[in-house]
Amino acid sequence: MRVLLLLALFGLSQALQPGYEYKYKYRGRVATGIPNINSQVAASAFESDVTVQVISKEDMRVQFNAILIGDMNDRVTCEDKQTPSDGYEQIKFNPLVDFLDQVASPFKVNMIGDQMKPFYFNDGDSTWVRNIKRAFVHVLHIPTAAPNLEETPISNSPSFQRIENHPLGECPSWYTVTPLKEHLLKFYMPAPLGSDEQTDLDNTMWKMTKSVDFDNCTDSVSSHTFGLLLDGKTDNRKCGEEYVSTATTGFYVLRGGPRGVRIEKAVQEGTYVIDHDHVHTYTNQTLDLLSVTSIGSPLAVTGESQYSFKQ
């Protein structure tokens, strides 16, 4: 019953409360390699502090700050894999220069329409910038498909589903919320916040887990080892569409109760393998709450920097 009560009272789809400004540390990484051949890995990474202002139930403002990008093209050794960094310490970070104005400009998220639908960004954005924004919003935007007292009949299950955008298409994602066990707190408890003005929030901790059902995707994309098939090269077609093995998991640490909840910590991991050619791609995103304060003045956004969920 505790789980059902929490699910019924999520309130905001992004699980953050109006009137507050949340600051997070966000990290996103993608790596590709062919481990059957050698341990060479090509990786790119994005790291930033992020300010999230919740103006109202429909209006959320976001701004990236202290933006770093990095890359790596090297072998990952057994010693690397045994360290907590899993080899990612080899990524060399530098301040973002290209597209800085686009990435650092505040943007608005309109939480309207059917929250079951994937998030949509304007085609006017640069593809790389659009992917960064979409990735962050999808990590932050936990579902409202949970049982809702006013709109949806109460379910006997703590699990619920939402359609989301993934690299292979629009796929169902399953979420489950359970109370965070006492003996697990030392593993999942976030670091102390620099500031926490959300004093009315319940201190109950919850764990939300996520998995993606890739067998039931719609608008699926084709997977190609090579993007171009050369004329007269018949063997190129062997590198065309192949079956892709996939796995995406994640977890959120939530704090709160009937008065509201917030995301304290989040981790999402994805694996995509083109089976015939043994090409492995790994994705990783993390979110860590740094501080919570009352909103001073809303971030200013232009008309071109407002985004909505598909209707």
Image (cartoon, rainbow, N blue to C red):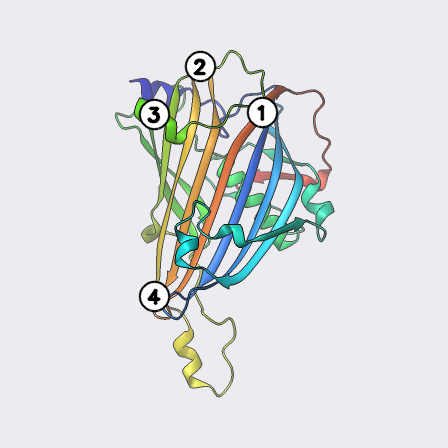
Q: Work out how far the residue at label 2 is from the one at label 3, CA to CA, in angstroms.
A: 14 Å
Seen at 56% across and 28% down, the residue is 290
Is disc 1 placed on a helix, strand or loop?
Answer: strand
Residue 77 lies in what quarter of the image? bottom left
Going by the numbered disc 3, the residue's amino acid type is Leu
The residue at which mark 4 appears reads as 275
Compared to residue 70, the image places residue 13 above or below, namely: above
Using the numbered discs, state the Cα–Cα distance from disc 4 to disc 3 in whole angstroms: 37 Å
Q: Residues within 10 Å of mark 3 (few under 14, many from 20)?
A: some
Q: Which residue is mark 1?
A: 291
Residue identifier under label 2: 202
Answer with left or right where residue 291 lies relative to residue 77: right
Tell me what residue is drawn at x 34 percent, y 64 percent. Answer: 243
Q: Amino acid at mark 2?
A: Asp
Q: Is 40 above or below relative to 195?
A: below
The circle on residue 180 is 3
The x, y position of residue 240, in whole percent, is 42, 73
Q: Position of residue 86 (x, y in %)?
A: 44, 50
